[in-house]
Image (cartoon, helix red, strand yellow):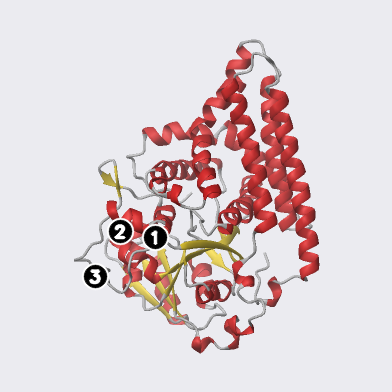
Amino acid sequence: MVAPTSVAATKTPPGAAVRSGLRGLALVAVLALLALLVVKLEFKSPDSNYAFWIYGILVTAVVLVTMTVAFGFYRDPALVVRAGRPEMDPASGFGTWPLVSCIVAVHNEEALVTRCVASIATQTYLNKEVIIVDDASTDGTRSILRELAWVYPIILIELPVNRGKKGALSAGVLRAHGSVLAFADSDTVWARNAVEMAVPIFVGNPDIGAVSGHCRALNADSNLLTKIQDSWYEGQYSVRKAFESVFGSVTCVSGPLAFFRLSAIYNFMPAWEADKFLGQQFRFATDRTLTAFVLGGRHLSRKYPLHKDSPFASPEYPVRDWRIVYSKSARAWTNVPATFKAMLRQQIRWKKSFIRNIFVTGRFYWRRPFLPALFYYVHVAFVLFGPLIAARHLIYMPLRGDLVSPFLYLAGIATIGFSFGLAFRHENPGSRRWLYRPLMSLLSTLVFSWLLFYSAATIRKMIWHRG
């Protein structure tokens, strides 16, 4: 793993970048169209169900448009803001740049916490404070953090009782002095210039309330499962987040590397920490819910009234709807599940978060730009009806004597996965890990999509699994 260490390291000659982008876009578009053709051929028979045929067309069309927009129109805001404006490079004078509060909530993470804290404390961006919140760890984490506090200039907060990730981060925010907050998961390592790349986006764009960085698997080389997840992570960021970023409407500022303008979230911290679903506190959906408060604060403030008696309440930060973007050059690496059991647990947690998020982001996202809003609700439908579609092709149709249908269906899924694999190769020339991406599509269809039912049935079960 080689992390970028300077702005120059992330730049490529403009002409080469354009040519590379066009080649990648052409390859991805062709593969997506081939997947669309496979779906059309699959439902060619006269007795095909029209609704299922439309579903198949929509799935591939959404992938095609998403990739076209991501590769054809996305521009990294960290590089855009610097183009032609050398004064926007923090290296020209950190003293004039905003204070950034880097905050990490830690609970029983003794194996990775040293690397995590070191990567944050040694950032090239100098005008920062590092706040580490130990959420009542019961292993050796607290002792390690105390030793790190002697090595690096960090503020260590030791909570006497476990408050969960949201409560621990809230404690860190209450202690923070920066106008920009940078959150990290405790099993994550940042590139040394991650903060340096992200901060100018806020300085140059006063309407941006949050920035999502780019993330890959830290332990990608461990085994087949971690390689598969690493190939999937790339597409979730460089394709899906890039698509939403074009419209300033990224739906999830992911935990490994998340930047927020203090004024965008300050008043919402109590509502975020005390978020309830089905009558009890909801411990999941931390990243998506906080993102929702930034995207749709004006609308969500009606359901989540500001806590006037809270230490977070501040008239200096009026409620508004902000833009949220994704920066490809602000990078991090996070630990992913290395066993199938751990991966299943993580998927269940994510499915519960997805269900909860429908009732948060889904309340207002239709007010965002038309295309990402349309795709958001279409994606919700895909996830909800995906298991039914899979059951029809893999179980119902073979029972009726149609033995070709499951093979064509899986071929279509694999082809879409292959197109994401080409997107991975476009972003990582020379890497052969793109070959693992179709396996993630097949795993999602054959295994993970069915976890939606279990997640819904056990959604009141708030046991946290890191994965």
Whole-Å distance between the Cαs marked 1 and 2? Answer: 8 Å
Under mark 2, the amino acid is Asn
Q: Quadrant of residue 362?
A: top left
Contact between marks 1 and 2 (CB within 8 A): the answer is: yes
Q: Nearer the viewer, mark 2 or mark 3?
A: 3
Would residue 373 be found to the left or right of residue 89 on screen? left
Mark seen at residue 107: 1
The residue lying furthest to the top in this view is: 401
Number of disc labels: 3
Q: Which residue is mark 2?
A: 162
Which residue has dot 3 on it? Answer: 311
Judged from the image, the secondary structure of the residue bearing numbered disc 3 is loop
Q: Amino acid at mark 1?
A: His
Crowding around mark 1 (Cα neighbors within 10 Å: few <14, some 14 to 19, many 20+) is many
Q: Which mark is residue 464?
A: none
Give x and y (percent) for residue 85.
Answer: 63, 81
Outermost residue, left side: 309
Residue at horizontal 53 percent and vertical 86 percent from the top: 94
Disc 3 residue type? Pro
Q: Is residue 76 above or below residue 418?
A: below
The answer to which image quadrant residue 13 occupies is bottom right
Marks 2 and 3, the one that precedes in the sequence: 2
Residue drawn 62% across the image and 25% down it? 53
Q: Residue at x 64, y 13 (%)?
A: 47
Quadrant in which the N terminus appears: bottom right
Tell me the crowding category of disc 2: few under 14, some 14 to 19, or many 20 or more residues within 10 angstroms, Cα based. some
Q: Earlier in the sequence, mark 3 or mark 1?
A: 1
Q: Position of residue 35 (x, y in %)?
A: 71, 35
Q: Secondary structure at mark 1?
A: loop
